[in-house]
Amino acid sequence: MKLHVHQKLVRLLIVCGVLHLSAAHAQQPVKTVKSNALSAPAYLEIPLGNIRPEGWLRHQLQIMRDGTTGHLDEVYAKVKNDNGWLGGRGDGWEETPYWLDGALPLAYLLDDQALKTKVRKYVDWVIAHQRPSGYFGPLTKAEREKGVAITAANCAEGEDWWPKMVMLKVLQQYYMATGDARVITFMTRFFNYQYKALQQCPIGKWTEWATSRGTDNAMIAQWLYGITGDPALLRLAAMIEDQSFPWSHWLGNRDWVIHAAAYQDDRDWMHRHGVNVGMALKDPAIQYQRTKDEKYLQYLETGFNDLMTLHGLPFGMFSADEDLHGNDPVQGTELCAIVESMFSLEQIIGITGDIQYMDALEKMTFNALPTQTTDDYNNKQYFQIANQVQVTRGVFNFSLPFNREMNNVFGMRSGYTCCLANMHQGWTKFASHLWYATPAKGLAALAYSPCSVTAKVGAAGTLVTIREITNYPFEDSVRFELSATKATAFSLQLRIPSWCEEAVIWLNGQRLRTEKGGQVITVNRTWQNGDRLTLQLPMEVKVSTWGRNSRAVERGPLVYALKLQERWEQGTDEKEGPYFSVYPKGDWNYGLLQAQVKDPAQLTVKQVKPVTDDFVWNIAHAPIEIVADAKKIPGWRLYNDVAPTPVTEREGVYKGKVNDEVEQITLIPYGCTKVRVVAFPVVK
């Protein structure tokens, strides 16, 4: 593989030869490869650091910087001690790359020099210690003990492909932030080595994790092809896919997801492991990108819809405890599965431009993600439960119970520590994918949160900055304020979510137009410095149906759960360290009245407090409440420490004993809760 790239590389975005430069590095032209070998992307990623989080989102990232994301290497012995990715004998597998996969983008999103310095030392070590053959990673046993030089001919002396796939993602992001030309040279040399080595040391030689997750490897090879144009990279990507699990085929052909729903034994469990599935969601899109075969887009749609139908839960995610485990609201979901599914959706959006995945990303982010970590981002739950009326030690009805019963509590090291290392990519990559560039040199806002974006747009490459001023997802207004060095014509694309019946667009205080939901619209004009565009997305209260005939209350991208005051208790496990249990203060065994389920407009929405720049996803900061009428179900009690959903008839009404008294209950955003009911039975 030859390197066909100008050596004075700058911060940029290159996908299939299309680029957008940041303000700081816009002066130098870059030669890029123009090729039609890959399918034309719907949207292009914007260089890391050109999107700046603001408001509540910036505060969330600051919490992470001050907590484990910024300091995992100081507080977690496995990463801290003699790290293999810095030349030591310690962690040389996935956890250090996992951590960097979130910590590195955080450093550039916040422009935090101390964190940049911290993560840069790992990047520098990895690049500086690439072997002459192109192999990279921690020093292997053979290298240490025998002085072996690893080459493609003796690739068996190397180690697992899987953690290298994660480190390649780290290096890609570093390049997107800095334009450091060493990354292109490094990847070119490694992929040359891998192309030769895979013929003797296939992707699954060391672990089935690599066989499960080869798509991440192929994705980076195809990204590099967009820069160098070396056709061997596409052959490599195809070889990796051929040696990996056939996820696209499984997603598009329903036997796989049906079997995953039916069986929970130890046969083929890697095929239904929730984190593997979350990573695999992007496989059809990556295959489509390389082959241009539209069957892969159908595989993606079929697989995603089947997955969410058979295993979907009200908070926008599928069960994964650790395996796919059906749609009962007392099943669990692993934190790693959430952040990997989010990243897959972000890649799918760029390749396909399909709005259903944009809607899915927001729902997953604003509901599933925030509830599974503590306010300080120092403790996490390995598995969360939708109807989680208490957080305690126990076995529960999970497919992976653990003997120490620590998979549901909040702790730094509770459950497996893969999530402690991997959780950091969730918020950071969401923040870096709020905006995309368009092939026509415009901009697209496809997920909403307070932020700003800087890019060159239009035929003349005019530098613009757009501030996105909003308290979304808690409010229905998103305001865009444009700063430009001169008037410039470009297209601005805006997503109108599928849950929105009709959006209203305002330009400089004047009503511009209305648009139906479920589409991405385009506003074409010559934009002036100081232009203001406002997107109004009316949020109606709706009721959705979930497993065991339960109902959930939704408004906009948010799902609402029963507000329960919390009692926290701290404990210590001999092996997994300190942890927290959480118990409710008050009753939780309520059913929603059928009349309000049929007519959600009867539910009362109240703004109870403003969303400030110090917002935290917890009860104290919950800005919106929905008041509903309910009746208590006295027979709905804990069983094996969970709250199995009461059985209902076809009509969806619980027929057991129900109290006569109608009570008003308060619902708050699911992401602000730790104990809750979100999937309610219905009563008369």
Image (cartoon, grey):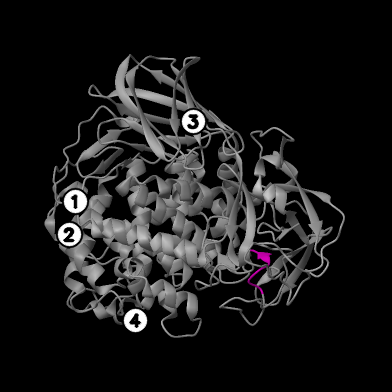
Residue 197 location in percent, x, y?
A: 20, 73
Q: CA distance from mark 1 to mark 4?
A: 44 Å
Q: Is residue 408 magenta?
A: yes
Q: Quadrant of the N terminus?
A: bottom left
Mark 4 and mark 3: Cα distance apart in space: 66 Å
- Which sits earlier in the primary sequence, circle 4 or circle 2? 4
* Amino acid type for the residue under numbered disc 2: Leu
Range shown magenta: 406-412
Q: Residue at x 66, y 79 (%)?
A: 404
Residue beneath disc 4: 145
Discs 4/2, front: 2
Residue 674 % position (x, y): 70, 57
Q: Who comes first in sequence, dot 4 or dot 3? A: 4
Q: CA distance from mark 3 to mark 1?
A: 35 Å
For the question of whether residue 336 can be seen, the reply is yes
Number of residues whose C-alpha sits closer than 10 Å to that of mark 2, classed few (under 14), some (14–19) or many (20 or more): many
The three-letter code of the residue at mark 1 reads Leu
Q: Is residue 145 above or below residue 178?
A: below
**Residue placed furthest toward the right:** 661
Q: Nearer the viewer, mark 3 or mark 1?
A: 3
* Image height of 113 relative to 291, above or below: above
Is label 1 in contact with label 2 (beta carbons under 8 Å)?
yes
Disc 1 versus disc 4: nearer the observer: 1
Q: Viewer-nearest of labels 1 and 2?
A: 1
Mark 1, residue position: 38
> How crowded is the residue under tag 1: few (<14 C-alpha within 10 Å), some, or many (20+)?
many
Q: Which mark is residue 503?
A: 3
Q: Which mark is residue 234?
A: 2
Task: Answer with mark 3 or mark 1, whichever residue precedes in sequence.
Answer: 1
Sequence order check, earlier mark of 3 and 2: 2
Instruction: Return the x and y of residue 87 as percentages of the image width and height.
Output: 40, 66
Of mark 1 and mark 4, the one earlier in the sequence is 1
